[in-house]
Image: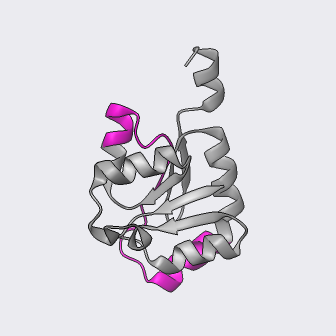
Amino acid sequence: MNFLVDAQLPARLARFLNDAGHEALHTSELPDGNRTADGEINRLADAGRRVLVTKDRDFRDSHLLRGTPRQLLIVTTGNITNDDLLALFATHLDDVVNALHEGPFVELGSDRLIVHGSHARDAEDGQ
């Protein structure tokens, strides 16, 4: 699975995802780095068929209102250490990937994983 990790999350998360066999890019690696505008991040995520991984609720609003980014993983843990965040991903990465195959918008919290929408339902609805 391809990921684009947003600026509020550590570059270590992108490295972790790459080491786990996925392809991940951190916004710090983009031409404008962590100052890349949200619209450009959405465009790059969609063009590269990447799941945008973020804590920024503005991307949730953009996904729900405009359908971009097409796939979104929003981290809803609140403030936790980077080590705890990486441990959370290490524990739940397979579940996260499976959830992203189920639906285009997934929330990962410290104690929950929620799938919003359903690719199967979207296909049934002709979308």
Examine the rendering and report whether any part of residue 75 can be seen.
no
Please say which color scheme the image uses: one colour
Q: Residue at x 52, y 67 (%)?
A: 25
Magenta segment: does it hold 69?
yes
Q: Quadrant of the C terminus?
A: top right
Magenta segment: does it hold 4?
no
**Which portion, as a residue range, is magenta?**
62-90
Q: Residue at x 54, y 49 (%)?
A: 48
- Image coordinates of residue 93 in percent, x first then y, are 66, 64
- Image coordinates of residue 35 in percent, x first then y, are 26, 67
Residue 94 in the figure: left or right of residue 31: right
The residue closer to the viewer here, 52 or 106, is 52
Examine the rendering and report whether any part of residue 100 can be seen.
yes
Rendered image quadrant of residue 37: bottom left
The single residue placed furthest to the front in the displayed view is 31
**How many discs appear?**
0
The residue closer to the viewer here, 13 or 87, is 13
Q: Residue at x 65, y 71 (%)?
A: 18
- Image coordinates of residue 40 in percent, x first then y, are 33, 51
Position of 23 relative to 67 (above/below): below
The residue closer to the viewer here, 25 or 101, is 25
Position of 94 relative to 127 (above/below): below
Position of 68 relative to 99 (above/below): above
Q: Quadrant of the N terminus?
A: bottom right
Q: Residue at x 49, y 45 (%)?
A: 47
- Image coordinates of residue 60 in percent, x first then y, are 36, 46
